[in-house]
Amino acid sequence: PNDISYNTVITAWAKSGTGPESARRAEEILQIMKDKNLADVISYNAVMHAWARSGDPNAGERAETLLRTMTDKSNVQPNARTYTTLIDAWSRSTADDSRARRAHALLNEMEDLWKSTGNERVKPNCISYSAVIHAYALSKEHRKATMACELLRRMVQLYTSGENVDAKPSLVTYNSVLNACATSTRAVERDEDGESGVNLKHIVRSIYKELTSPSQNLRPDHFTYGTILKACANLFCGEPDNPKFVQEVFERCCDDGQVSFGVCYQLRQAATSELYRSLIPEEAYNAENGHFSIKDMPKEWTRNVREQRRRYRQRK
């Protein structure tokens, strides 16, 4: 068998969904390839992907070991996909509380390698930056939303300046920043000294304003609206201006045809009982238990909902 045959089998194991065992089997095949001098960057990337999808709590550590072996003991050079897959593995490493910082360190390593060598194959792109933001959103870092927002602003600066046009933020990027805000444990994230901090309400509302601006090419989807409402419920509930903002967000969501089950669920958490009742149509509201029926919502409210699972699309 040649390298293509081996890589095909590794990829099959990575997609098999059999947990850590699939990653171990993929790594065994990689070792056979290394012994025969057949391993290439595609081989390593596929095994890292297997660890990222394995569900192993130490997936990041296992995948990073492969990167270090790859760069220290072989002639195989990593590319942007290598680093992004490794960042993804760290974001899923539940055994390590520093997973977001480990992911961020890898992004910094990518940037340094690209700038020092001029190698375009390792230049960070939107997917690389977004994967680190996603890692912060999944983490328990006490400044997770602040760090995610700083990365978003850096992406905007890199793109608008022309320094790295591949860093242009996508809707997934913005949604991940919103998710970092919605899952934070505090409405104001303070610095280590505790003297200054970032109000997450300002981040959430500025992103909402930016995405709904007529000059913005990106348009919010149901995940955007649902996550904004989730932030309102988790962080801003009880603030005087929260009901007005919740109503504005939901009505804009209706106009955009992005009302999904998730949006309605988060609306119920974010809105007062009276506001929630006033926003849900009579035919879609169960007065006995206060539940909603998504199938009975006006069709124009749900017309643009796409429920397919989001995936990072990467090029080899």
Image (cartoon, rainbow, N blue to C red):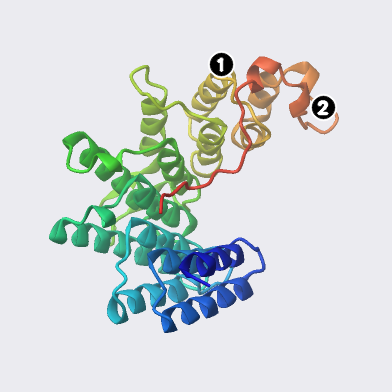
Is 24 or 211 nearer to us in this picture? 24
Q: Is residue 68 above or below residue 288?
A: below
Q: Residue at x 78, y 28 (%)?
A: 293
**Can you give x and y, in whole percent of width and height, for residue 210 in the image?**
36, 27
User: Residue furthest toward the right?
Assistant: 288
Is 259 or 89 nearer to us in this picture? 89
**Can you give x and y, in whole percent of width and height, for residue 117 in the image?**
15, 60
For the C terminus, which image quadrant? bottom left
Q: Is residue 264 visible?
A: yes
Is 225 or 48 nearer to us in this picture? 48
User: Residue furthest toward the bottom?
Assistant: 35
Image quarter for residue 234? top right
The residue that mark 2 highlights is 286
How packed mark 1 is, by other alpha carbons closer than 10 Å (few <14, some 14-19, many 20 or more), is some
Q: Which mark is residue 158?
A: none
Could you tell whether 36 is left or right of 121 in the image? right
Could you tell whether 227 is left or right of 73 in the image? right
Q: Are marks 2 and 1 in contact (CB under 8 Å)?
A: no
Q: Residue at x 43, y 60 (%)?
A: 85
Q: Specify the amino acid type for callout 2.
A: Asn
Q: Secondary structure at mark 2?
A: loop
The residue that mark 1 highlights is 255
Q: Residue at x 54, y 27 (%)?
A: 246
**Can you give x and y, in whole percent of width and height, for residue 310 in the image?**
55, 43
Q: CA distance from mark 2 to mark 1?
A: 23 Å
Q: Residue at x 39, y 42 (%)?
A: 200
Q: Is residue 129 above or below residue 48?
A: above
Could you tell whether 119 is left or right of 267 in the image? left
Image quarter for residue 15? bottom right
**Can you give x and y, in whole percent of width and height, for residue 296 in the image?**
78, 22
Q: Specify the amino acid type for callout 1.
A: Asp
